[in-house]
Image: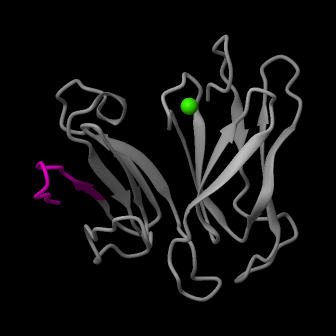
Amino acid sequence: MRLSEPIQPRIVTAPLAGAASEPPDYRQKVPIVYYRPGEWKRELISDALEGVLHGIFVTGWDQDGRDELLTASFLGIHLFRRRKDGTWTQTELTKGSPQPWPKCGSSDVAAGRLGRLRFLCAIEPWPWQRQVIDDTLANGHTIHAAGLNGDGRDEINGGGLPDIACIGATTLKWYENLGGRGSR
Ligand SMILES: [Ca+2]
């Protein structure tokens, strides 16, 4: 993850749930932290999320040369941005599934680009402009947007047609982007 100039990698960690939380509700705050190379000191990004924090996704959200962090948790999908002074902003992008706790929120998130359009793909999102690609995947676990058809382009960052891969309990599905028609 690139958080500042000059570009240096950082390690971001996000536990699945709070250390003392218990299933099925996992009612406890979940800390997201990062470490800089060399000192490896634990620095807090946020402890505002709660429940299961199942997915994180590092992305250049605003193309300012620094990476941002997307999270998928019981509270939905959030965007974390690092300010120049080192503090972080948190923006809720969607609350995810509206079902009662602990079936609320979102399980995993990835960001991609379709030409100039930016999109999120998630396992059970809610608002935004939502299009159901598949409702047959059992126990959807993780998701990613990428160029999967070997055309040599980084389709997340460089345009083109991003595809989506999703892992369920016993299946790995590839949803090929056919320019709006889609197939799997
Ligand atoms: Ca950025």
Camera-side residue of 176 and 104: 104
State the image coordinates of residue 165 (x, y, percent, origin top left): 32, 52
Count how many numbered circles sit on residues in the image: 0
Q: Main secondary structure of the magenta part?
A: loop
Q: Quadrant of ligand 1?
A: top right
Left or right of 116 on screen, residue 59:
right
Camera-side residue of 94 and 161: 94
| Image vertical order of residue 82 relative to residue 98, above or below | above
Left or right of 26 on screen, residue 184:
left
Quadrant of the image occupied by residue 50: bottom right
**Residue found 48% across the figure and 28% down from its top:** 63
Quadrant of the image occupied by residue 161: top left
Is 175 included in the stretch rendered in magenta?
Answer: yes
State the image coordinates of residue 55 (x, y, percent, origin top left): 57, 56
| Image vertical order of residue 91 relative to residue 145, above or below | below
**Residue found 72% across the figure and 82% down from its top:** 25
**Residue found 62% across the figure and 25% down from its top:** 2
State the image coordinates of residue 131 (x, y, percent, origin top left): 28, 68
Left or right of 6 on screen, residue 30:
right
**Residue found 17% across the figure and 60% down from its top:** 184
Quadrant of the image occupied by residue 100: bottom right
Q: Which residues are magenta?
A: 173-184
Camera-side residue of 116 and 24: 116
State the image coordinates of residue 144 (x, y, percent, origin top left): 40, 49
